[in-house]
């Protein structure tokens, strides 16, 4: 009996060892593909960021004209390994403008999307007729492509021919008839031609597309809260606001932290809507870091500097994520997000 038990233990051990070997065999193609598609390009671009590789001579001239950099003519494959690109990051005023714009998009956009998404989720969590149809209608913007959102935004926010400008003109006429206000009111808004308004317009268009995402996730979280909890609160005489403040919002915190982090990381990469609407203008007022990288690499042909900016953006995203996760750990247990 003891021998049989020992044999069984050995067989189980051999089976476990065989299982581990088979797992490694089956996982090895996945690991190889991961290394080939993710790690190798990352390391390759890191190497590029330490070079001054550029496109042809004519493009190099445009780089010099646009950036004021002292050129070295056509470089071809003659890479010079140096940290010049990273030193240039610190003195590139256009890069700092793009970084400031990106932070505005991230913090303002995430705030607007979360607040409105939470309010919409609260409304759609109530019982009313045609609730399913209303949910589908709210989800339509999320299903469209960023290019469509950009072209729609260009039409909507046209300061002369757009429907929003038309509504503002009618409101201006109406307000002009109010004796207290008189005819001094001016509701003309330069949505895409004035710096501050143009940045805000980019935030509005991105929010229009992604508020449904926030709403959808938060609504799913609300519906996962047991009804018993709400019924017990109502029996204790809690008002709707108290139920939201003491039950709904705290129980949504782990989910809220997750969607805020996801959207924050996504907005760091915003480019589509900006390219379609303002092209980064007026000047470079609405240019994001991703768009600056795109122009540096594919318009100016300065691949080395574009790679350096990309890694700077990666560092920023890692810092943002780390700070955010460190902040929410103060309020939410680690195993809940």
Image (cartoon, rainbow, N blue to C red):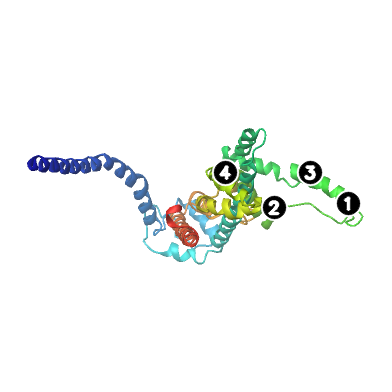
For the residue pair 268 and 247, the one nearer the viewer reads as: 247
In this rendering, does residue 278 appear at all? no
Question: In the structure shown, which secondary structural element does the residue marked by tag 4 occupy?
Answer: helix
Q: Residue at x 28, y 42 (%)?
A: 27
Q: Which mark is residue 166?
A: 3
Q: Which residue is mark 1?
A: 176
Q: Are marks 2 and 1 in contact (CB under 8 Å)?
A: no
- Say which label, 4 or 2, has the lower sequence index: 2
- Looking at this view, name the residue that lies furthest to the front: 235
For the residue pair 257 and 322, the one nearer the viewer reads as: 257
Say which of marks 3 and 1 sits in front. Answer: 1
Q: Which residue is mark 2?
A: 193
- Say which label, 3 or 1, has the lower sequence index: 3
Say which of marks 4 and 1 sits in front. Answer: 4
Dot 1 crowding, Cα within 10 Å, few <14, some 14–19, many 20+: some
Q: Which residue is mark 4?
A: 219
Q: Residue at x 82, y 54 (%)?
A: 186
Dot 3 crowding, Cα within 10 Å, few <14, some 14–19, many 20+: some
- Say which label, 4 or 1, has the lower sequence index: 1
- Side of 106 relative to 32 (left or right): right
Say which of marks 4 and 2 sits in front. Answer: 4
Question: In the structure shown, which secondary structural element does the residue marked by tag 3 occupy?
Answer: helix
Q: Are marks 3 and 1 in contact (CB under 8 Å)?
A: no
Q: Which mark is residue 262?
A: none
The alpha-carbon separation of the residues under discs 3 and 2 comes to 17 Å
Say which of marks 2 and 1 sits in front. Answer: 1
The alpha-carbon separation of the residues under discs 3 and 1 comes to 15 Å
Q: Are marks 4 and 3 in contact (CB under 8 Å)?
A: no
Question: In the structure shown, which secondary structural element does the residue marked by tag 2 occupy?
Answer: loop
Across and down, in percent, residue 49 comes to: 41, 57
Above-or-below relation of 264 to 23: below
Above-or-below relation of 46 to 150: below
């Amino acid at each position: 009996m003891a021998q049989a038990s020992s044999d069984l233990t050995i067989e189980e051990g051999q089976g476990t060892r065989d299982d581990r070997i088979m797992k490694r065999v089956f996982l090895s193609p996945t690991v190889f593909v991961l290394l080939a598609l993710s790690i190798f390009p990352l390391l390759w671009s890191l190497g590029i960021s330490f070079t001054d590789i550029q496109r042809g001579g004519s493009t190099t001239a445009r780089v010099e004209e646009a950036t004021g950099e002292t050129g070295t003519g056509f470089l071809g494959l003659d890479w010079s390994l140096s940290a010049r690109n990273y030193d240039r990051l610190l003195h590139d005023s256009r890069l700092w403008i793009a970084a400031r714009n990106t932070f505005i998009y991230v913090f303002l956009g995430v705030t607007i999307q979360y607040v409105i998404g939470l309010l919409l989720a609260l409304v759609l969590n109530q019982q009313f007729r045609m609730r399913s149809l209303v949910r589908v209608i709210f989800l339509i913007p999320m299903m469209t492509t960023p290019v469509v959102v950009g072209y729609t935004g260009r039409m909507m926010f046209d300061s002369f021919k757009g429907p929003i400008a038309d509504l503002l003109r009618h409101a201006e006429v109406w307000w002009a008839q109010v004796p207290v206000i008189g005819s001094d009111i001016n509701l003309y808004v330069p949505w895409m031609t004035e710096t501050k308004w143009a940045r805000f317009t980019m935030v509005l268009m991105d929010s229009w597309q992604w508020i449904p995402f926030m709403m959808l996730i938060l609504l799913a979280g609300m519906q996962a809260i047991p009804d018993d909890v709400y019924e017990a609160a109502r029996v204790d005489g809690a008002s709707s606001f108290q139920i939201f403040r003491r039950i709904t919002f705290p129980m949504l915190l782990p989910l809220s932290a997750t969607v805020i982090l996801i959207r924050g990381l996504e907005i760091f990469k915003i480019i589509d809507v900006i390219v379609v609407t303002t092209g980064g203008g007026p000047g470079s007022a609405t240019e994001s870091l991703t768009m600056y990288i795109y122009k540096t690499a594919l318009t100016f042909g300065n691949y080395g500097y574009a790679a350096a900016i990309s890694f700077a953006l990666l560092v920023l995203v890692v810092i943002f994520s780390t700070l955010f996760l460190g902040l929410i750990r103060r309020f939410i247990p680690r195993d809940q997000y």
